[in-house]
Amino acid sequence: MGIIVGLCAAACFGSGDFLGGRASRDAPTPVVLFVAQLSAALGAVVLVLVFAGSPIGVDLAYGAGAGLLNVIGLGLLYQGLATGRMGVVAPTAAVVAAVIPVIWGLATGEQPGTLVVVGVAVAVIAGGLISRETGEVGGGPVSRSVVTALCAGVGLGASLVLYAKTGSDSGLWPVLSARIVAVGAAAVAILVVSRSEPIRLGAIPRRLAIIAGVFDVGASAFLLYGVRNDLTVVVAPIAALGPGFTVMLAWKLLHEPVSRVQVVGLALALVGLALIAAG
């Protein structure tokens, strides 16, 4: 079950990141982020109405903290996707976002089987290979977009840890509290940016941002379900394969080149999934 849920989260993450990054190329990132989070908040309202839950204060607090970290990570990720190659920025952020909850899961006593551990390691390595840019040579300077991606990964990974600390009885209410905080944080970012540049959002970027928000809240719901019903060290690396969807969408729709190393990374990702499933 963890594999299927993780793959659904990965598909939502990868698709949402592509759409949000694409919208940020034609509009200010804070505006795109605000519209996406507002869309996600509306989606979260629907989820809590459909799926029952009885949250307590600490669950909502963890959700709020996760939302703040998530929106910071998403903002950095959208900015990185808008200024750098999607096929490099998204996987770099994803590797960091996967490593943090895996370390947390192991530190808190999760004990996956040997094949699962090997599969997780292969999945993380796959994410690293997907993040390699064509012609990249070791020892070169690190681009600003990659640094942005690393910081984004820290925020996204830490938000998953907070989601994992919520109680199962709370249902999807932590997702709603997360989105409410995220909308507020994005609104503050708009106020700051509006002092120095005009705030405009065309019809196409607005539609892309709305759909990105739907994918974002879907990914959060799948993740929350996954970490409550399976090991975090299993779900997180599978969800971190979302950049594979981003890379393929960027290749298909934006005609960004896909290197042989990235193809190997995608193949290794499948191997990692098979090992986790076998474990």
Image (tube, rainbow, N blue to C red):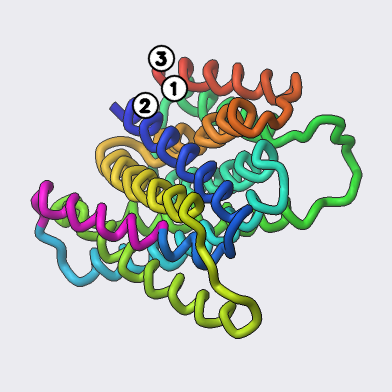
Snapshot quadrant of residue 55: bottom left
Tell me which segment is drawn in magenta.
Answer: 36-53
| Helix, strand or loop for the magenta stretch, by majority | helix
Visible in this render: residue 77?
A: yes
Q: Observer-nearest residue: 209 or 204? A: 204
Dot 3 corresponds to which residue?
278
Visible in this render: residue 62?
A: no
| Residue at the image point whose x is 60% and y is 17% from the top | 267
Q: What's the amino acid at mark 3?
A: Ala
Q: Check the image and report above or below for 190 versus 36.
A: below
Cα distance between the residues tagged 2 and 3:
11 Å
- Measured from the top left, where is residue 134 in percent x and y? 81, 30
| Residue at the image point whose x is 25% and y is 58% from the top | 42
Mark sitting earlier along the chain (2/3)? 2
Q: Is the C terminus in the top left, top right, bottom left or bottom right quadrant?
A: top left
Q: Residues within 10 Å of mark 2 (few under 14, many from 20)?
A: many
Dot 1 corresponds to which residue?
276
The residue at the far front in this view is 203
| Residue at the image point whose x is 24% and y is 64% from the top | 59
Q: Observer-nearest residue: 159 or 122? A: 159
In this view, the mark in front (2 or 1): 2
- Measured from the top left, where is residue 125 in percent x and y? 64, 30
Label drawn at residue 249 = none
- Measured from the top left, where is residue 201 in percent x and y? 51, 62
Secondary structure of the residue carrying tag 1 is helix
Secondary structure of the residue carrying tag 2 is helix
Q: Are marks 2 and 1 in contact (CB under 8 Å)?
A: yes
Q: Is residue 264 left or right of residue 4?
A: right
Label drawn at residue 3 = 2
Q: Check the image and report above or below for 188 versus 79.
A: below
